[in-house]
Amino acid sequence: MTDIAIEKKPSPETPSLKVPMRVTVLGGGSFGTAMANVASRNGCDTRMFIRDPAIAKEMQETRRNQRYLPDFVMDENLSFTSDIEYAVRDRDLILVAIPSSSFREVLRQIAPFISGQAIVSLTKGIEPDSFALMSDIIREELPQVAYGVLSGPNLAKELMAGIPAGTVIASPSEAVRFAVHQALASALFRVFANTDVQGVELGGALKNIYAVAMGMGAAYHVGENTRSMLLTRALAEMSRFAVRLGANPLTFLGLSGVGDLIATCSSPLSRNYQIGLALGQGKTLAEAVEALGQTAEGINTIRQVRAQAEILDVYMPITCALYEVIYEGKPPLGIALALMQNGHRSDVEFVLPNTTPAS
Amino acid sequence: MTDIAIEKKPSPETPSLKVPMRVTVLGGGSFGTAMANVASRNGCDTRMFIRDPAIAKEMQETRRNQRYLPDFVMDENLSFTSDIEYAVRDRDLILVAIPSSSFREVLRQIAPFISGQAIVSLTKGIEPDSFALMSDIIREELPQVAYGVLSGPNLAKELMAGIPAGTVIASPSEAVRFAVHQALASALFRVFANTDVQGVELGGALKNIYAVAMGMGAAYHVGENTRSMLLTRALAEMSRFAVRLGANPLTFLGLSGVGDLIATCSSPLSRNYQIGLALGQGKTLAEAVEALGQTAEGINTIRQVRAQAEILDVYMPITCALYEVIYEGKPPLGIALALMQNGHRSDVEFVLPNTTPAS
């Protein structure tokens, strides 16, 4: 068998000439933690910014993220701080893993300390009200920085367990793409490059809608044929929407598109799937949320995207059907069968345009 | 709830002015049977050609396909014949569901009776030795006919059970695309259109390779992250190969590309997956085939496609890695880890071309 060194560190006999990259992760959620751990294992000088000093101290001492990833010990070289200036100043790469609702606020806080650091968003989502993507917020708040977005099928627990995975760094800057590859890529984590920032971000932002749909479908008699059809129709409307916003439809062939969609829709335990299942079983949204004990991100995304699709005049039959079930009390089975009778349409409209108007 | 009529037939009060389409299916395998049943249920005048007169008679009497789909009763209006001239003459649509190794021979047999019928291939595969796709064979043998290919995630048993599904008809002729939609589309079976015949066919022909890879991966510690990465890298190399042969990469976003790939790779009981699993567990090909009692289509496809990729100079790392494991006795884990260390590459090369040469 091949000699496999999974966590290779530079040995004392062969000193590396490479200066370790200085990486900071903002935010102490599960994905930020997993990425900080990947960077630190890779030999980067890595800091995590945790707002609450008590939690930062606890993480520094226990090397565990008790709230989000209690079962894993983090890399021994990773350090933690609640001093935002110290976290951000004189670093090479700032990875921002802050919820979309406070993403803009955090960029405003770090603005005074930015002088050449590249900013990379790890956040999948859309800013409430503005419909801004995280890259839009970076460009608005820090117009002079080099930036990128990281997105892909990256369940944090699997990353912490060292299970092989891949992700996408999208940036207009080759320097940023290369730096992120240097910082994060390893034998367990492949980093692929893309230039289509909006396409990559929209894949991550929209996918939760279809996990709700998949859960709702599971309440009926669906098979592999049906699941595959639903996933490809989901891709059709995600890419249609993204193209309307300037993205490249081919991006959806990649890890951040179909890759993340498959991973998200294959998790029957996810909140999005469970809410969809309850709705398919005839529960109202209020009943479904009560049964689950919490709501799911996809439910809000459906409302946001449906409103935006109306403004932009984009045909999104699955999103609109989910909206009708969730917010207008329509029967799920009737809605599903109406979708099945949508007439003679193109499979991939970027290959063969639809001539009949969407209804 | 909505009033749902799943198998609506024209009622005597509202006579349909539509002349029923005359459809013939050549071949009595499971997929041909399922499609003949779909057409017949839809009101088409449908015949199946079964070479063996005894079997044709038995199917006519029992309305069952005892060998391939014994659990299902076929539509009462479907008829069966072993007279090839009667099967083919004066029909509108000939659906050919014959294995790739005898596809050409059957076209030669029907050639004398062809006078305007459209010919649609239902066969997923590549002709041994010639590397011809079924559409190539149709164009060579019957250069004057209007033709198409049908492909998608369509497990025959699910179709017989009436579980919702979708498929793709690819043809350069709008008349053929429309006729196939008219013949087959229903509230349980959506038919989408494409013009990229080669892209649609190659999706169906190549997917089995990756079911072998998925099975091999299952022998190790893989998660949803890994599965999603493998599927998207499979799409990358399938579309790269297809584009080299003139296809449109966007076709792989559709049902015949990613849709069929997902369905095929999600069946742990499939032969392709089982052979891959045995290989991943360290068995040789001979041992794996013996354990399974039979070989799998993907094993031959790997050899065919790897040879063709070499001729065409197309980078197909997964196919080549599988070839090395299966035919050269290389260790699967070492091969998999080498794939993980393939450097800084583009996620979707049709968006961002790779600048470093493939190794």
Image (spheres, coloured by chain):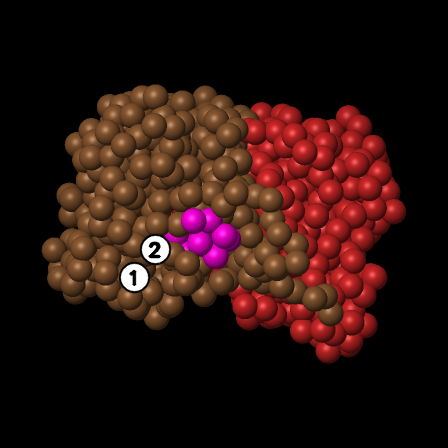
Chain colours: A red, B brown
Displayed quadrant of residue B209? top left
Q: Is residue B186 visible?
A: yes
- Residue located farthest toward the bottom when viewing the structure as drawn: A291
Q: Is residue B307 above or below residue A26?
A: above
Q: Are marks 1 and 2 in contact (CB under 8 Å)?
A: yes
Q: Is residue B113 above or below residue A69?
A: above
In the rendered structure, the residue with mark 1 lies on which chain? B
Q: Is residue A65 magenta?
A: no
Q: Residue at x 65, y 65 (%)?
A: B4
In the rendered structure, the residue with mark 2 lies on which chain? B
Q: Which residues are magenta?
A: B36-45
Judge if badges 1 and 2 mark residues of a common chain. Answer: yes
Q: Is residue A215 left or right of residue A52?
A: left
Q: Is residue A298 visible?
A: no
Q: Residues within 10 Å of mark 2 (few under 14, many from 20)?
A: many
Question: Which numbered disc flags the more N-terminal residue, 1 or 2?
Answer: 1
Q: Which mark is residue B79?
A: 2
Q: Is residue B43 magenta?
A: yes
Displayed quadrant of residue B109? top left
Q: Is residue A218 above or below residue B301?
A: below
Q: Quadrant of the C terminus of chain A?
A: top right
